[in-house]
Amino acid sequence: MPPRAGLNLQSIVKAATVLADEHGLHEVTLTILAKKLGIRSPSLYNHVNGLPGLRREMALTGLDQLKNVLMYATVGRSEDKAIREMSRAYLEFTRAHPGLYEATLYISDTDDKELDTMKNQVLELFTQVLAGFDLNDDALIHAIRGLRSVLHGFSSLERTGGFGLKVDVNQSFELIIDTFLQGLHTSQ
């Protein structure tokens, strides 16, 4: 039986992304996705290699979108301005696409060169932005890890309701980025 007209990998990943963003990545199953698409779940196997294959495709899509958002935010900017804009763009992406962001954390059981390449492209953006601070090799790695940890940690805590106190979350975020930048400047 030929695949349903209009059903392709892109439309499947898009529908899965909507589900993940609305209900969480853990709620995306082939059964639920097939129901949303109005098909039987075996039809999905014409396009993805089961749930692991779908999550891989979502990870690739999410990493590509995150990379593009971060590139756009940092073009023509350097040092503090680039870090601030990259950080804001990262947070905005995780807010707009919480399920897709969660998919970007997908870890494959096998050597997946395409997934590794996409992850490295996102990592390279962090490297390029932080390279403007003239840090030695080890300090640059520490700074990359630090910024990624700040952004992921803040995004994850916010997504799971970890900021219940009645103080402006955006103001907290800006203060944290300012503190990170002050630390970079004192380590130069």
Image (tube, rainbow, N blue to C red):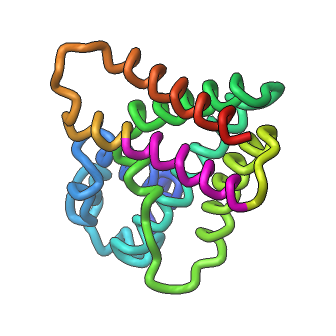
Placement of 64 over or under 79, stated as above or below: below
Residue in the image at 18% along x and 14% along y: 166
Residue 163 on the magenta segment: no
Placement of 49 over or under 72, stated as above or below: below
**Residue toward you, 46 or 166:** 166
Residue 131 sits in quarter: top right
Placement of 146 over or under 87, stated as above or below: below
Q: Name the magenta segment's main secondary structure.
A: helix
Q: Quadrant of the C terminus?
A: top right
The image position of residue 15, as x and y in percent, is 38, 48
Placement of 13 over or under 133, stated as above or below: below
The image position of residue 41, as x and y in percent, is 27, 68
* Left or right of 63, for residue 13: left
Q: Is residue 2 visible?
A: no
Residue in the image at 49% along x and 59% along y: 59
The image position of residue 74, as x and y in percent, is 73, 31
Residue 142 on the magenta segment: yes
* Left or right of 133, for residue 53: left
Residue 168 sits in quarter: top left
Residue in the image at 38% along x and 21% along y: 172
Q: How many marks?
A: 0
The image position of residue 154, as x and y in percent, is 37, 37
* Left or right of 139, for residue 133: right
* Left or right of 2, for residue 168: left
Residue in the image at 51% along x and 50% along y: 62
**Residue toward you, 4 or 12:** 12
Residue 73 sits in quarter: top right
Q: Which residues are magenta?
A: 138-153
